[in-house]
Image (tube, grey):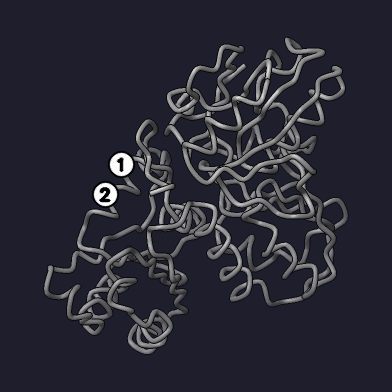
């Protein structure tokens, strides 16, 4: 029962992360469920739902359809959608039901391609892991499938991987690009204000910037395939200047996704702070310092916070599970945690 959440709301799951990556790419995404998981994505985990259109559907399987694994029915429905929606590809995102009955997602992929004539990406998400796992899976499969042409490199062109609302709290790319120090004509955020064509032309990028651990596997693929170098950074301006300037000479705990937490640590250390980073989500070994912590449950969080920190910088929703912490709590929204978009200076 270590992962039982008694004080905080459930964190965004892997199927939501996959849908976040696919949302603006111009495909048809079908969530393989009876309706509940699609409602969770559209109602809670996708803030672009009311401002940017996307062909995102529930498979709408009845109980017995789901239990018996009637794959041909799902493929038939998908083929009917392709007759009404102009799309470059299709995708099928897994949920707990297909995971429990051991649905062969790759077989679904092949069946769909034969029926629709469109490329299909089936993702073996299961709704039990966290959003970054689904993002990593989706980024990798999309770049693996569509970033195949070696094009001439455009001088100064930068590709940003990991720019989803779940990671950044941003629904548009402008503040992310400017926060990284680039102009709008220099950089592209894959999957945010850009579609499949940007993925297909990824080899034009002179370099890549990864702003979340979920994008590193895809960046490594592009590096191996095209020789494109990549670095891990995060747009520091998204945090708000008051967080950095108002803290000095203190022992601080930062909780966020790893790339964001590390970037904030750099800025805080310049002010003479001693900083430890922690995350509920995936942590890459090469980005982890001694003393950093991967939080697996509320008990881990309460124990960690009790280790003499003067200040905690984290989403205020975590405060509920912090026990008797008496130091300063500085709110740092993380959409995958609380469903709140980024603060605006």
In contact (CB < 8 Å): disc 2 and disc 1: yes
| In this view, 56 is above or below 66 | above
Q: Secondary structure at mark 2?
A: helix
Image mark count: 2
> Could you say where residue 38 lies in the image, as x and y percent from the top left?
29, 54
Residue 87 image position (x, y, % from top left): 41, 68
- Is 23 placed above or below 225 here? above
User: Quadrant location of residue 66?
Assistant: bottom left
Give the residue drawn at x 78%, y 72%.
151
Judged left or right of residue 25, residue 207 is: right
At label 1, counting other C-alpha atoms closer than 10 Å, the crowd grade (few under 14, some 14-19, many 20 or more) is few
Label 2, on which residue?
A: 39
Q: Nearer the viewer, residue 292 or 167?
A: 292
Residue 180 is at least partly visible in this image: yes
Q: Nearer the viewer, residue 28 or 16?
A: 16
Q: Is residue 302 left or right of residue 54?
A: right
Q: Secondary structure at mark 1?
A: helix
345 over 176 or under it: above or below: above
Tell me what residue is drawn at x 69 percent, y 66 percent.
201
Residue 193 visible in the shown view? no
- Crowding at dot 2, Cα within 10 Å, few <14 / some 14-19 / many 20+, comes out as some
- Residue labelled with disc 1: 43
Residue 115 spot, x, y in % from top left: 33, 86
């Amino acid at each position: 029962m270590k992962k039982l959440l008694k004080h905080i709301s459930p964190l965004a799951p892997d199927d939501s992360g996959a849908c976040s990556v696919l949302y603006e790419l111009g495909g048809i995404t079908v969530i393989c469920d009876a309706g509940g998981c699609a409602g969770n994505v559209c109602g809670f985990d996708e803030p672009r739902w009311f401002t940017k259109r996307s062909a995102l559907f529930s498979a709408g399987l009845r109980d017995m359809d789901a239990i018996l694994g009637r794959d041909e029915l799902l493929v038939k429905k998908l083929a009917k959608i392709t007759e009404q929606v102009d799309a470059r590809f299709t995708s099928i995102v897994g949920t707990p039901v297909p995971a429990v009955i051991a649905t062969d997602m790759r077989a679904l992929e092949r069946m769909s391609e034969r029926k629709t004539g469109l490329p299909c990406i089936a993702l073996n998400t299961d709704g039990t892991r966290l959003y970054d796992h689904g993002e990593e899976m989706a980024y990798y499969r999309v770049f693996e499938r569509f970033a195949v042409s070696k094009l001439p490199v455009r001088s100064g062109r930068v590709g940003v991987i990991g720019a989803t609302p779940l990671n950044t709290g941003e629904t548009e790319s402008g503040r992310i690009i400017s926060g990284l120090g680039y102009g709008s004509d220099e950089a592209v955020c894959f999957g945010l204000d850009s579609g499949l064509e940007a993925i297909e032309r990824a080899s034009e990028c002179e370099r890549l910037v990864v702003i979340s651990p979920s994008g590193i596997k895809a960046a490594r693929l592009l590096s191996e395939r095209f020789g494109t170098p990549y670095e891990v950074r995060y747009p520091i301006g998204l945090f708000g200047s008051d967080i950095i300037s108002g803290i000095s000479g203190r022992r601080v705990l930062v909780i966020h996704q790893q790339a964001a937490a590390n970037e904030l640590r750099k800025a805080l250390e310049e002010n003479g702070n001693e900083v430890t980073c922690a995350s509920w989500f995936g942590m890459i070994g090469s980005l982890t310092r001694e003393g950093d912590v991967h939080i697996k449950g509320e008990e881990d969080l309460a124990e960690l916070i009790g280790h003499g920190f003067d200040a905690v910088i984290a989403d205020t929703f975590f405060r509920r599970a912090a026990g008797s912490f008496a130091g300063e709590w500085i709110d740092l929204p993380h959409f995958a945690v609380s469903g709140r978009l980024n603060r605006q200076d």
